Image: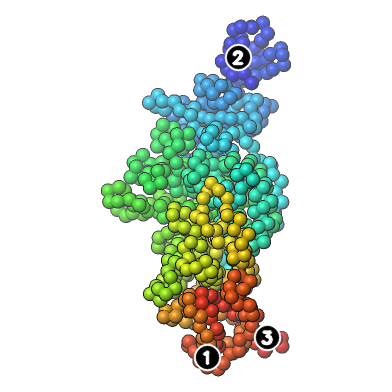
Amino acid sequence: MPSGPEVLDILRQRPDIWKQYFFCHERIFSCNTGRTIYDPYALPYTYITTADRHLFAQGNHYQIYEKLGAHRRHYQGIDGVGFAVWAPNAMAVSVVGPFNQWDGRCHPMRRHDDSGIWELFLPNLGNGELYKFNIRSHNGECFLKSDPFALFMETAPDTASIVYDIDGIHPWGDAGWLEQRGRMDLWRSPISIYEVHLGSWMRGPDGRHLDYQQLAERLIPYVREMGFTHIEILPIAEHPYEPSWGYQVSNFYAPTSRLGRPEQLMAFIDQCHQNGIGVLLDWVAGHFPKDAHALAQFDGTHLFEHADPRQGEHKDWGTLIFNYGRHEVENFLIANALFWLERYHFDGLRVDAVASMLYLDYSRKPGEWIPNEYGGNENLEAIEFLKHTNAIVHARLPGVMMIAEESTSWPGVSRPTDAGGLGFGFKWNMGWMHDVLGYMQTPPEHRPEKHHQLVFVLDYAFEENFILSLSHDEVVHLKGSLYTKMPGTAWEKFANLRLLFSFMFTHPGKKLNFMGAEFAQIEEWNESAELQWQLLEHEPHRALKRFLQKLNLLYSSEPALYESDCRAAGFSWIDAGNHQQSIIVFLRKAKDPRQALLVVSNFSAVSRFDYRIGVPFPVPYTVILDSNDAGYGGLESDTLGRTITVSEIPWHGQEFSLTLNLPALSTLILKPAPLQSDRSS
């Protein structure tokens, strides 16, 4: 379609072939070659209603992404694209793209003075058009910005937004999954999460990214085979810098084009659901990058961020902090959370860096931050934003998981907002990760000195609804892989990994493991290369993979391991005090006490024989897991399924006891046999 200046040039040069017709409220340029060009300024178009503007200004327009941005419209018999952008402090805004040779003079937008929203309908445009907003600030500067509400973007380093209609682009087949999800009691269900960076889980033969379709063909069967219940995807909203792993988002409503098109992402999630796998998204709402094409100083002022760097800048990350006190910014983020959950059917959001949002003095020295109105360090506006987001998500989408990555002791993170909490459903247990990894990295001969580190984690295990996480953060920045963290010889490293995972899966709390941990990736994670899949050519790595598979199966099939994850009634110590021998013994309990499991772990490098353990029931106990089994890379071959008889010898405060041989660096899980009355019934 010719641009405005081109039309004028044609009229000047060839007035004989053009006629201008005026029709009441519109003007149409008609060419005798059959081309018709509509004048957008003759159309009294407005799609943004007074109610839209009012709700947006209040921070309560939860589908604002359907109004702002670029959307195909049909208006007065004319097909085109409606553009709308919030830029209240701009002097002028225009839409530019190849359709007008990126000339900011051609298509200036109309301003709604009561909201700072600019709007324009351009006839004859459609899907796939590139565009940006040309913004002129009060100081006379002009600059190009991508659309904050763009639904798709060019692949970096290009930064143009793309008109992309996502309505009806994928025929969803997961209605049954969504209905079941809405009835699910998450806190009493098994949840084992496989954390994945889609760009580096696996690569093609040429080293290129797999697209969403290729990932669906490979990743979904793998996750299902391994027995994980959920996939958690590191951020996939468009980001300019790939080594940021997606945590520096430039376009919050656009899935990255590095991995394919929006309908391919929808199909990937749909296939996960049809295979019984939930999909969680790592969501970044705490900061954004300073890239010139994105949100920073969007209309020539600090619109999305604070003007004062003591409030508006993360120096550690080189990013900017959202101004949560501005209702339109709060609305932008809350609507974004709902967008991913409602339009892409994600099953939950893991909210990144919550601590950095909660504290005004996060990673700041005295004098580098501004106290709140009461003189404290709490970010009251961020707290209200988080509560608002969680309340709306849980009200609209029952069964969706809202997970906080929060690294401090802030109270009530996973408690309901009406009970004074932040409203998250779950919180990553960062303390568990720190304490347990610190203990496991200690050579066995020195573990008695750090025994408190291992057992202390149970002192706070029920303060929140926890997810035990061994995440990507623990295998980057020269921290080494989980394998290299373990002390000892190669065999001892694998034994320690089995011990670590056994403790994780029997400890109260849901589970999360980062990709590669399941087969003992040796190298630190590198986002620019695929995992070391070649390691599975070696039996020790295959054996560990089988062990993780077994743990997932056991976890999902034994109610004692998940029913009371978030309640103290689901756990009791048998013996937590044997620091000299580095042995712990505890019970995991289900609602039915007859389904309790006995867990015995020997964290020392010394095997113990005829080790007596107190037990609560006078019935035989059967070994249902032995981490030292030869099939998992251990040394035992006949322990699994062995029945252990019980003696009427009180021990460890219990009325009965049994004796076990405890191999070095190993865990045994035992299940009591049904009582005689249970058998007869």
Q: What residue type is disc 2 on?
A: Val
How are the residues colored? rainbow
Task: Give the amino acid type for the residue marked by disc 1 in the picture.
Answer: Glu
> Residue 630 appears at what percent x and percent y?
62, 73
Q: Within 10 angstroms of label 2, few (less than 14), some, or many (20 or more) residues?
A: some
Is 393 rendered above or below residue 319? below
Name the disc covering residue 386, or none: none
> Looking at the figure, which quarter contains the N terminus?
top right
Residue labelled with disc 2: 7
Question: Which residue carries the number 3 mark?
Answer: 678
Question: What is the quadrant of residue 274 in the picture?
Answer: bottom right
Residue shown at the point (44%, 66%) measured from the top left: 441
Q: Which residue is mark 1?
A: 655
* Cβ atoms at labels 1 and 3 below 8 Å apart: no
Image coords of residue 590 (percent x, y)? 58, 76
Identify whether 43 is placed above or below 158: above
Q: Earlier in the sequence, mark 1 or mark 2?
A: 2
Kind of element beneath mark 1:
loop
Viewed as shown, does residue 370 lie left or right of 679?
A: left
**In which quadrant of the rendered image does the C terminus lie?**
bottom right
Q: Is residue 423 above or below residue 325?
A: below
Q: Secondary structure at mark 3?
A: helix
Q: Could you tell me which residue is drawn at 27 percent across and 51 percent down?
A: 366
At mark 2, the secondary structure is: helix
